[in-house]
Amino acid sequence: MTRVFSGIKPTGHLTLGNYLGAMRQWAAVDQHRSDALFCVVDLHALTVDHDPARVRRLSRQAATLLLAAGLDPELCTLFVQSHVDEHARLSYVLECVATDGEMRRMIQYREKAARERERGGSVRLSLLTYPVLMAADILAYGADEVPVGDDQAQHVELTRDLAVRFNQRYGGTFVVPRATVPKVAARVMNLQDPTSKMGKSDDSGPGIVYLLDEPEVVRKKVARAVTDSGRDVVYDREGRPGVANLLEVLAACTGGEPGALAGAYGSYGQLKKDTAEAVVEVLRPVRARHRELCADPGFVEGVLRAGAEKARAMARPRVDAAYRAIGL
Ligand code: ADP
């Protein structure tokens, strides 16, 4: 059976982008068709300035929301990265096959490091080595497929390179995985700045719809979405990124095609209204289930404990094999 691995970083409250671009497919498709592991990658949340208590709280919240979004512990393995030592163990070994030049070429590193420096901060070494840890996350489980948004494709490419290099030098140990990018909503954009991704790490803005936003808040945020001075609704990602983003969100929520939906609208106002309602409806059951789960924290804890045990048992033999192969 195909093995799928994917993760979510507890660096902020989860967004509509996380849901439409990832969580929804994990629940509706991936956990049914494959042997799937979903991981709250808390070690990755330490690569930038962080508050320890907040990371812990957000990890728990992310796991709860993943369950609320429909992940079923009977069908998949849901766990927290730091509960399974094999990630860090394997990461070190992979650091011994990766090069510093390879790391410095990563687009996300360059962007995030530049942002840290602009703020006058220093860049943590873990920000540079982050893709190696991500490679370890994937390779430890022998994952065949890694569903990711398009901004993570370069990291999966690096993971493949490291797997091939390790296998060539030290003997066949790792499965070489491939990235799968969702056909819809691969990149939900910020409503206030439709040229940048709706990323939870920004954590502030009126341009980000959070999964736990009240319906009224969702409506307000969508109503204030930046569009442009045009009037007619056309689907043009380059020329009209704001409108295109609304059409894509509406399409992702209702199952239509953004281009075809455009033709049904005579004004931006109606498009925004319908998009807001579609988002509210998509999030309604997730929010309801989240409320139920919050009332039963022992359940979530039990799922994560069992998930970590299962994950550990899957990862350990391959990580042990990598240690032996490299000479330990
Ligand atoms: P973030 O980029 O918000 O920190 P993560 O790295 O935790 O998110 O990503 C978790 C999953 O959610 C990944 O598969 C990622 O590609 C997806 N994702 C995150 N933001 C968006 C977005 N705006 N649009 C589509 N998918 C997204």
Image: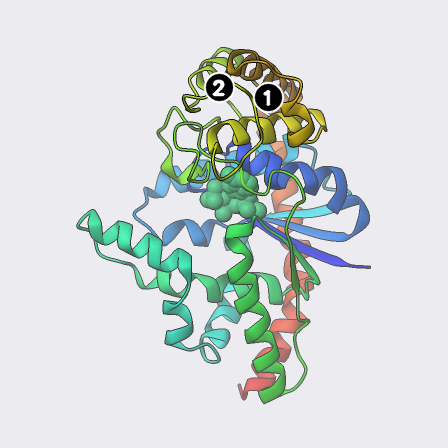
Q: Label for residue 109?
A: none
Left or right? Give the position of 17 relative to 182: left
Pick the quarter of the image with the N terminus: bottom right
Amino acid on which disc 1 is placed? Val
Q: Label for residue 279?
A: 1
Above or below: residue 142 compared with residue 46: below
Name the residue beneath numbered marker 2. Answer: 222
Q: Do the residues labelled 2 and 1 touch (CB within 8 Å)?
A: yes
Q: What element carries label 1?
A: helix
Res 86 seen here:
no
Who is closer to the viewer here, 152 or 87? Answer: 152
Residue 68, position in %: x, y? 64, 30
Q: What element carries label 2?
A: helix
Residue located 48% across and 19% down the image: 222
Between discs 2 and 1, the one toward the N terminus: 2
Residue located 42% across and 17% down the image: 224
Who is closer to the viewer here, 244 or 10? Answer: 244
Distance Cα–Cα, label 2 vs label 1:
9 Å
